[in-house]
Image: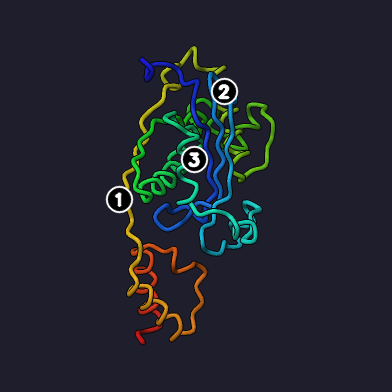
Amino acid sequence: MKNQEVLSSYIALDLETTGLNPKRDRIIEIGAVQIVNGKVKDTYQTFVNPYKNLSKEVMQLTGITDAQLIGAPGIGDVIDDFLTFAGKEPILGHQVIFDYSFLKRAVVNAGLGFERCGMDTLKLARTFMPVDIKKNLASACQYYGLEQRANHRAFQDALAAHELYEEMKKRFAKREPAFFIEKPLIYKVKREQPAGKRQKEHLQDLLKYHKIVLSVQIDHMTRNEISRITDKIIAEYGRI
């Protein structure tokens, strides 16, 4: 059975995002590597327009700027292409549930289903590396003598996660094969509803009245996002 075999074909994935919360933050870059029998077969990478300004912290961490994202497609315009690239293969990543949660939310919001198995190289690092060594992707790659790549860029991190997995598999899979078998990725999410016209107009009126400038484009906000921001403005500044 496939689910009893050591994982050798998969999609190594990494995302860069505007923050850490998949309910509120957005994807800004997708990097993925298609692996077949342990070897790179194809690659995928794209910027994604989040329709909001990046924080200074995100720009410093990733090196990605607002100017690079202005002309990029939105997540709704790239998700079909990515799913075609990924097929039905398991997803591999370093703390893979983080990337999977953002990706699944995007897929569900596009009206599609998405359930995958996966492999987490962070869990492998915590299992097989000494307790006193840092387990982030860069530190784990350095510990195993792998090529150091640019941190916090999606494609480079996806490729690094693949190389880390293959190195750990080579060292430990024969002795501990159970750790190298794909597992279901569990993240539950409901489709978010787009904001209505009256809801957008009410927020625009509040912004104009209180002279507030938002960093996010209203036309690309969900119903829940506008509701949260509207409530926050009223609580802080009052009604019109």
User: Which of pointers 1 and 3 indicates the residue nearer the eye?
Assistant: 3
Q: Please give left or right for residue 76 compared with residue 230 in the image.
A: right
Q: Which residue is mark 2?
A: 166
Q: Secondary structure at mark 3?
A: helix
Q: Which mark is residue 190?
A: 1
Q: Of 210 and 170, which appears nearest the observer?
A: 210
Q: Are marks 1 and 2 in contact (CB under 8 Å)?
A: no
Nearer-N-terminus badge (1/3): 3
Q: Please give left or right for residue 85 compared with residue 69 in the image.
A: left
Nearer-N-terminus badge (1/2): 2
Q: Is residue 232 above or below residue 77?
A: below
User: Which of pointers 2 and 3 indicates the residue nearer the eye?
Assistant: 3
**Which image quadrant: the C terminus?**
bottom left
**Residue shown at the point (47%, 52%) measured from the top left:** 20
Q: Of 215 and 111, which appears nearest the observer?
A: 111
Q: Amino acid at mark 3?
A: Phe
Q: Which residue is mark 3?
A: 82
**Residue shown at the point (55%, 22%) measured from the top left:** 168
